[in-house]
Image (cartoon, coloured by chain):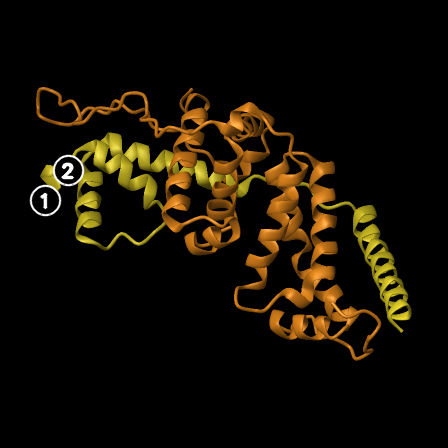
Amino acid sequence: MKKGATTTARISSAADDAQLIALAQAGNEQAFTVLVRRYEDVVFRFAFKVCRDRDKAEEAWQDTFVNVFRKLNQFDGKSKFSTWLYTIVTNNCLMKRRKRKLDDAIVPLELPDGFRDEPMQDSNGRPIQTIASWKETPLHSVMDTELRHTLDRAIEKLPYDYRIVFLLRDVEGNSAEETAKILHLSVPAVKSRLRRARVFLRERLNEYMTS
Amino acid sequence: MSAKKLKCREIAEHVCAELDEGMNSAKCRAIRRHLETCPNCASYLNSLKTTVKLYRAYPAPALSARRRKALFEVIRHSGKESAESRKKSQSKCG
């Protein structure tokens, strides 16, 4: 971003990303501020979910916008601005993590307890359910301490490479193609990691959700 | 593909890959038919969907006002530093 060449015209908060980026690249500080305001919560929430630590997430958040400020002229608009942002924040979170042994583990595709290739049948030929149904869980129940701890424990055990894919794809709603671009992976690799991550988490929540 | 030929293992592998994607292919239609009659696969799919929903709903704390304020101070400082270093390198070249 060019520094010093500021303009004083008011920027509408309704301006689209491309307009704001062009103005910010020309040195308009107000446009840059509007861009930060637009994405600050998205970036912080994502950083928190990846880092699982408030201080590290705040540091990653700050580093991300400092990087954006310094490198905005390198953004060529070929991908979405949010994709570029996710790439930067993911790298910053990666730098903050303490490498753990379990991060090198390959997550297997586990089958659930009670799984059979064909369902058993009762004497009337009706299928018998051997995979327990999960209890009804309204979304506001994620505020319950016990459920939150269960969710925390499960995702903390998920190796980092799989956690990032799950968060980018399922939680943040990026497409498989966008996720692949952010992580410099192929689309099939994203799909494979996502599948394993979902199954891994499901297995770790199963006991709580069926008790 | 006939729904009768599908085994639960295929369903399990497919449903977790296609959880939120369009299910309009012939295979996906067969899977849908299987899901209507197999309580295990229906329960499994439902639990995978719930897993995603719970993590989506998991709340993150709000960013602190202190950190928000600090960002623009860091950026202003960073801007000044780069302007100064540009000036220095220009005067050396000149």
The chain displayed yellow equals B
Q: Write down the residue under mark 2.
A: B6
Work out which quarter of the rendered image holds the C terminus of chain A and state it.
Answer: top left
Corner quadrant of residue A84: bottom right
Name, please, the residue furthest toward the bottom: A9
Residue displayed at 77% across by 72% down: A27
Q: Is A60 in front, or is A49?
A: A60
Residue displayed at 35% across by 45% down: B19
Distance between the Cα atoms at labels 2 and 1? 7 Å
Where's residue A116, x and y in %? 21, 24
Instruction: Check the rendered structure and report the hue given to chain A.
Output: orange
Residue displayed at 26% across by 33% down: B41
SS category of the residue bearing label 2: loop
Where's residue A166, x and y in %? 48, 41
Q: Pointer 1: residues within 10 angstroms few (<14), some, or many (20+)?
A: few
Mark yes or no: residue A81 visible.
yes
SS category of the residue bearing label 1: loop
Q: Are marks 2 and 1 in contact (CB under 8 Å)?
A: yes
A132 left or right, relative to A88 = left
Corner quadrant of residue A175: bottom left
Q: Is A19 in front, or is A204?
A: A19
Work out which quarter of the rendered image holds the N terminus of chain A and state it.
Answer: bottom right
Name, please, the residue furthest toward the front: B93
Where's residue A178, x and y in %? 47, 56
A147 left or right, relative to B40 = right
Q: Amino acid at mark 1?
A: Ser
Check if mark 2 and mark 1 are on a common chain. yes
Q: Which disc number belongs to residue B2?
A: 1
Where's residue A98, x and y in %? 65, 30
Q: Amino acid at mark 2?
A: Leu
Residue displayed at 67% across by 47% down: A44
Q: Which disc number belongs to residue A186?
A: none
